Structure formats: C-alpha cells, structure tokens
Image (cartoon, rainbow, N blue to C red):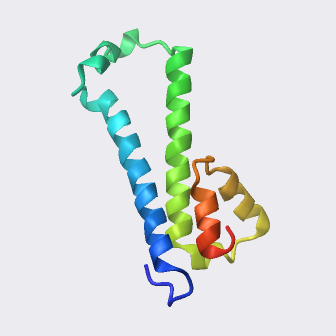
Amino acid sequence: MTYNNMFDSDKLRNIVKKVIAIWDEEYKELSNFIHTTNELYFELIDYIDEITPQPDNLEYVRNRIEKMNSIVNSFNILFFFSDYKHFSDEEKTLIRLSIENIGLKQKMIRVFGEI
C-alpha cells in the first residue's frame, strides 16, 4: 500500500492486520461446514435431497455473509481509498452501511479522516 505519506502507515497496517484476523476467524468457522474436519459439524452433513432450510441455520449463514461482506468492503476502502474518496455520497453511504460495527469504521476514520 503506497499512499505517499498521506496517512499514518502504522495505523493503516494495524487495521489491515485486524481485518485479516477477522477474515481468518470467519474462514476457519465456515470451512468446518465444507471440510468437515471437526466432528461437531459431522451432523450437519445430509444428502442433498434431505436438506431443508432451518431458521437457525439460515440465520447463522446470513450473519456470516454479512460479516464477510464487512471484511470485503473494509479491504476495498483500505486498498482503494484514493478511488473510494471520489465516489458519490450515496455510494459511500451504501458501502459504509454494509460494514458491521466491529470497530473497523472508527479505525479507518482515524487513519483517513473520513470514510
């Protein structure tokens, strides 16, 4: 990331590390459903024709998707801030609203002065 000394690179690096840590945590959790390396997730394996949506499972997946969306949009702002700052207010608002309140917005504001 090169921002020509426009921002505090240490603060920026810390935010990127935090987003990567959140990403890693989510990946580990979601990969349990795919790789079944954890016996706690074995019971979740069914035949395709037997799968029926369960409200608890759907809610869980929705929450994971929202968190991954927060991570991706945080990375987009972090790595493409020079492009992001030229977006319209409406576009910025949509992106900001898509980022969950997990402390990332406030940290990005401290580094960039805005998001």
Nearer-the-camera pick, 105 or 47: 105
- Name the image quarter holding the N terminus: bottom left
Q: Quadrant of residue 48?
A: top left
Nearer-the-camera pick, 22 or 83: 22
Q: Is residue 71 left or right of residue 113?
A: left
Q: Quadrant of residue 27?
A: top left
Q: Is residue 19 left or right of residue 97?
A: left
- Residue 57 spot, x, y in % from top left: 49, 20
Residue 48, compared with residue 11, is above or below; it is above
Residue 1, compared with residue 44, is above or below; it is below
Residue 115, compared with residue 8, is above or below; it is above
Rendered residue at 65%/67% (across/down):
109
Rendered residue at 25%/26% (across/down):
36
Q: Is residue 38 left or right of residue 63?
A: left
- Residue 97 spot, x, y in % from top left: 69, 51
Residue sticking out furthest to the right: 89
- Residue 106 spot, x, y in % from top left: 64, 60
Rendered residue at 53%/23% (across/down):
58
- Residue 91 spot, x, y in % from top left: 72, 63
Q: Quadrant of residue 28?
A: top left
Nearer-the-camera pick, 96 or 50: 96
Nearer-the-camera pick, 29 or 33: 29
- Name the image quarter holding the C terminus: bottom right
